[in-house]
Amino acid sequence: MAEPRFLVVRNDEEQYSIWSSDRELPAGWHEAGFTGSREECLAHIDSVWTDMRPRSVRETV
């Protein structure tokens, strides 16, 4: 059996998550351009999501 594939997804507030590649994305989330195993996707998020504050909060500071 093949290892499950995941997508890195991002919402309009630039918050990241992973989502199973065989499921439809929930409203408000978009593909962020990376697909892999769960571990690969989480590692990618660790490398790109360096400021955990939502975009709306970052822009007001």
Image: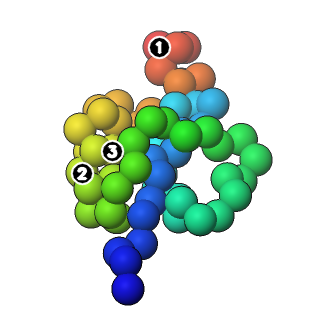
Of the residues shown, which amino acid type is indicated by label 1?
Val
Of the residues shown, which amino acid type is indicated by label 3?
Ile
Q: Give the camera-side residue of 41 and 48.
A: 41
Residue 49 in the figure: left or right of residue 5: left
Task: Give the residue number, with chain letter if any, for mark 2.
Answer: 43
Residue 36: give x, y in percent of width and height.
Answer: 34, 56
For disc 2, the neighbor class at 10 Å (few under 14, some 14 to 19, many from 20) is few
The answer to whether the residues at label 1 and label 2 have Cβ atoms under 8 Å apart is no
Q: Secondary structure at mark 2?
A: helix
Q: Is residue 52 above or below residue 60?
A: below
Task: Give the residue number, with chain letter if any, for mark 1.
Answer: 61
Residue 53: give x, y in percent of width and height.
Answer: 45, 33
Which label is found at residue 45?
3
Residue 36 in the figure: left or right of residue 32: left
C-alpha distance separating marks 1 and 2: 28 Å
Q: Secondary structure at mark 3?
A: helix
The answer to whether the residues at label 3 and label 2 have Cβ atoms under 8 Å apart is yes
C-alpha distance separating marks 3 and 1: 23 Å
